[in-house]
């Protein structure tokens, strides 16, 4: 039975890389009729944020990821304590009383070998007694290669702290064993911890599960993904107006590829087609244009009513529009938006009269164009007829009209826009320019 887990720490908002780990772990389990476990790793109380665990659950639910079992490490402290004590008893760990002085943030000692290791202390923090000059090797099932370390390069890591909480190194091993996790999938950042875990598995007499480290997601400008060009937190991207379906599709292809060139995947399809041989070895680049493309595709797949509801939920100006106009606006912008939040830029003129319009935007015949357009709107004569009868250049005529009504060159089709805006408001805007 394949059992995978997603083991986030509730220490900040979920990042796009964490979401990717969750999708891969979920698909690996579900493709094989296995089980997917959600485990909250809340052992670092100093870094924990309030509501963090609920936020993680809420986000996974938005993406339709359902977990078969759920655990919180802070409710399992006894288990870790016992394991720590056993390691000391068996001579593989020792008590240390200079924990704070000699520990770095990540639980490693500043010195590789801790001064307390031979003192035979009987209380304090518990640290791993790392042996000298032994080789630790494992085969990474994502990278498909063997990775080795010599223990002489590995520090005596803290396993259990004096605050009664384990560190990640101990809790992750105890839990992955206790919960019968068959495949561990995690970000590349965690690679340096793996030899420590392998020692702990061995000393506790546990079998080592399959372990795989996912590639790093890179920024288009080089380096690891950063926030320079917009949000990289899942919550932030959802708020920006990316649909969960589009984010899912985009994220799963950052580091995994199907055998054929298929591009569109629902979660169900991803589970069906998932194959661990599809993991890519090179670091993928977070290409925002690609994400926008996916999002546009998924927006077009929504029904008008579904899209209307998303606008209604996210745009307070849209909410104030007359009910019958809302659906009309929705239909009008549907083909033109990449994100739900694009509504405002494209349709703002419906709820807000354009402020100072740059007069340089108009063509040289704008006065004539607008005078005729105004008459036509008053008398309900089709604008195309006006343009034809007066021998106007169609493009120029409509561009001047568009700028007068909306204040910009880029808008939905102008005929329909005028219809939705209404005669009165349209004429008023044209007059203002002609004055
Ligand atoms: N708690 C770690 C994290 O926040 C888990 C790493 C792992 O999956 O082992 O990513």
Image (spheres, rainbow, N blue to C red):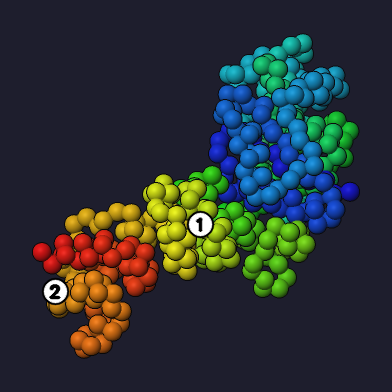
| Residue at 13%, 67% in the rendered image | 434
The reply, left or right, for residue 71 in relation to residue 47 is: right
Location of the C terminus (image quadrant): bottom left
The reply, left or right, for residue 38 in relation to residue 1 is: left
Residue 60 falls in image quadrant: top right
Residue 99, position as x, y percentages in the image = 64, 19
The quadrant of the rendered image in which ligand 1 is seen is: top right
**Of the image marks 2 and 1, the number of the one nearer the N terminus:** 1
Residue 370 falls in image quadrant: bottom left
Q: Is residue 372 above or below residue 206?
A: below
The reply, left or right, for residue 241 in relation to residue 213 is: left
Residue 79, position as x, y percentages in the image = 81, 24
| Residue at 56%, 29% in the rendered image | 49
Helix, strand or loop for disc 1? helix
Q: Is residue 264 above or below residue 392?
A: above
Q: Measure the C-alpha gap from mark 2 to mark 1.
A: 37 Å
Q: Which residue is mark 1?
A: 308
| Residue at 30%, 82% in the rendered image | 384
Q: Which residue is mark 2?
A: 367
Residue 337 in view: no
Q: Is residue 134 above or below residue 418?
A: above
Residue 157, position as x, y percentages in the image = 69, 29
Dot 1: few (<14), some (14–19), or many (≥20) neighbours within 10 Å?
Answer: many
Helix, strand or loop for disc 2? helix
Residue 345, position as x, y percentages in the image = 36, 58
Dot 2: few (<14), some (14–19), or many (≥20) neighbours within 10 Å?
Answer: some
Residue 398 falls in image quadrant: bottom left
């Amino acid at each position: 039975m394949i059992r995978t887990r997603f083991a986030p720490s509730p220490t900040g908002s979920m990042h796009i890389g964490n979401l990717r780990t969750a999708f891969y772990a979920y698909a690996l389990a579900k493709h094989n009729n296995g089980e997917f476990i959600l485990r909250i790793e809340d052992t670092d109380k100093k870094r924990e944020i309030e509501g963090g665990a609920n936020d993680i659950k809420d986000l996974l639910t938005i993406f339709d990821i359902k977990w078969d079992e759920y655990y919180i490490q802070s409710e399992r402290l006894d288990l870790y304590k016992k394991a720590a004590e056993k390691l000391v008893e068996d001579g593989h760990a020792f008590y240390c009383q200079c924990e704070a002085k000699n520990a770095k943030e990540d639980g490693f000692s500043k010195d590789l070998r801790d001064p307390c290791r031979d003192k035979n202390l009987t209380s304090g923090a518990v640290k791993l007694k790392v042996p000298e000059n032994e080789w630790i090797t494992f085969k990474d099932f994502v990278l498909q290669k063997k990775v080795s370390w010599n223990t002489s390069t590995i520090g005596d890591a803290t396993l259990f702290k004096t605050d009664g909480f384990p560190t990640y190194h101990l809790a992750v091993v105890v839990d992955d064993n206790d919960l019968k996790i068959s495949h561990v999938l995690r970000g590349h950042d965690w690679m340096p911890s793996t030899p420590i875990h392998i020692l702990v598995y061995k000393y506790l007499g546990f079998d080592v599960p399959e372990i795989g480290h996912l590639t790093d997601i890179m920024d288009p400008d080089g380096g690891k993904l950063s926030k320079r060009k917009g949000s990289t937190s899942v919550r932030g991207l959802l708020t920006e107006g990316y649909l969960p379906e589009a984010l899912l599709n985009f994220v799963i292809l950052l580091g995994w590829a199907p055998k054929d060139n298929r591009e569109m995947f629902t979660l169900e399809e991803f589970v069906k087609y998932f194959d661990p041989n599809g993991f890519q070895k090179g670091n993928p680049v977070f290409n925002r244009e690609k994400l926008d493309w996916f999002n546009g595709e998924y927006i077009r797949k929504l029904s008008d009513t579904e899209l209307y509801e998303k606008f209604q939920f996210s745009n307070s100006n849209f909410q104030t529009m007359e009910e019958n106009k809302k659906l009309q606006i929705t239909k009008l912008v549907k083909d033109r938006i990449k994100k739900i939040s694009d509504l405002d830029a494209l349709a703002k003129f419906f709820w807000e009269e354009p402020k100072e319009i740059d007069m340089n935007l108009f063509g040289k015949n704008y006065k004539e164009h607008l005078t005729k357009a105004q008459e036509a709107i008053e008398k309900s004569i089709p604008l195309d007829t006006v343009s034809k009868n007066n021998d106007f250049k169609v493009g120029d005529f409509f561009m001047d009209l568009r700028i007068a009504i909306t204040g910009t060159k880029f808008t939905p089709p102008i005929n329909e826009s005028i219809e939705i805006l209404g005669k009165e408001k349209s004429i008023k805007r044209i007059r203002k320019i002609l004055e």
